[in-house]
Amino acid sequence: MIPSRLDVPVRRRVQTLGVGLVALAVIASAAFGGSKSSSSSSSSTPSGTSFSSGTSTDDDFSYALGNGDQQYLVNVKNGHWHSMQRVADAHPNETVFWFSLRGDDYVVRDAATIARVKEITGPMRRLGERQGELGRVQGDLGRKQAKIGTLQAKVGELQAQVSLRMSELTSAASSDRGAGDREREELEAAMDELNEQQAALSQQMAPLARRQEQLGREQGELGREQQRLSDAAIPQLHKLATDAITRGTAERVSD
């Protein structure tokens, strides 16, 4: 939870600076206070809509498994998306295996073939779900980092304003030296409290940044594993597609 114990003292100290700084203090105080009760929410994706993608080393082969609402797994080269989507739209409630081979597009509705495609691509789909979950955690952390960053910026504004006023007091020849000394003391106290607030926010940011870095490494490892799985699946899917054409279970998609 973002600390808020310094809100009131900061606001009291800064009140000596006039309306402009009081407004900034109120903004920062509201931000600190509001953060106590807020919570970040993660967006959820239906499990059926998760998909993974890989890069095929076969320039003549692209494929997709899914239906009109859900592409479970896709590996589609540029120029084939329109054909794949058109097939998916034509079968909104039916899972189909779409592929493009040597420039021609096909769709397979045969249950046995689709079951085999699911079997081959199962590890990729499961890994894709793990990547999606990890991505949601990264998103949650990013939102927390953004909130703390906003608060750091607001405290920074106050620090700059206090510093400016302290410089003005130092350079100006005040006729009421006693009043100037009192204001300087208030400003120094306010700056100390703002520095403490900034340090507390930095302490909260540090573990989030470390966790984000760790998640990034994990995501990279999963990405490399996904590529390995994709490379292993492509030859099997290529053969499955060729066999479907030979058996006549693959329907040619007209332009």
Image (cartoon, grey):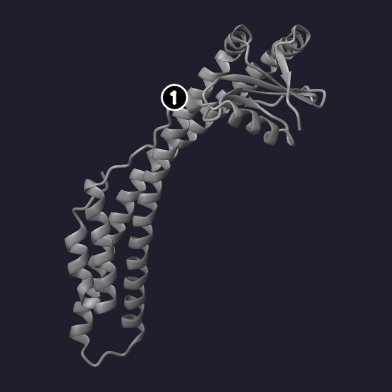
Residue 209, visible in the rendered structure = yes
Say which amino acid is labelled 1: Ser
Give the answer, above or below, for where 8 lies relative to 96.
Answer: below
Residue farthest toward the right in the current orientation of the protein: 102
Label 1 neighbourhood size at 10 Å, few (<14), some (14-19), many (20+)? few
Residue 223, visible in the rendered structure = no
Give the answer, above or below, for where 4 lies relative to 234.
Answer: below
| Residue at numbered disc 1 | 47
Residue farthest toward the bottom in the current orientation of the protein: 175
Determine the residue positioned at 32% across, 76% down. Answer: 166
For the N terminus, the quadrant is: top left
- What percent of the width, then of the height, locates residue 135? 47, 33
- Answer with the quarter of the image where residue 254 lies: top right
- What percent of the width, then of the height, locates residue 92? 54, 27
Determine the residue positioned at 22% across, 46% down. Answer: 37
Give the answer, above or below, for where 197 lies relative to 94.
Answer: below
For the C terminus, the quadrant is: top right
Q: Nearer the viewer, residue 148 or 120?
A: 120
Residue 233 placement, left or right of 166? right
Determine the residue positioned at 51% across, 18% down. Answer: 126
Give the answer, above or below, for where 14 lies relative to 156.
Answer: below
Assign a secondary structure to mark 1: helix
Residue 209 placement, left or right of 63? left
Q: Nearer the viewer, residue 136 or 247?
A: 247
Determine the residue positioned at 34% across, 56% down. Answer: 151
- Answer with the quarter of the image where residue 144 lies: top left
Q: Nearer the viewer, residue 5 or 29?
A: 29
Q: How many marks?
A: 1
- What percent of the width, then of the height, locates residue 229? 63, 16
Q: Nearer the viewer, residue 188 or 82?
A: 82
Residue 47 placement, left or right of 9? right
- What percent of the width, then of the height, locates residue 114? 60, 12
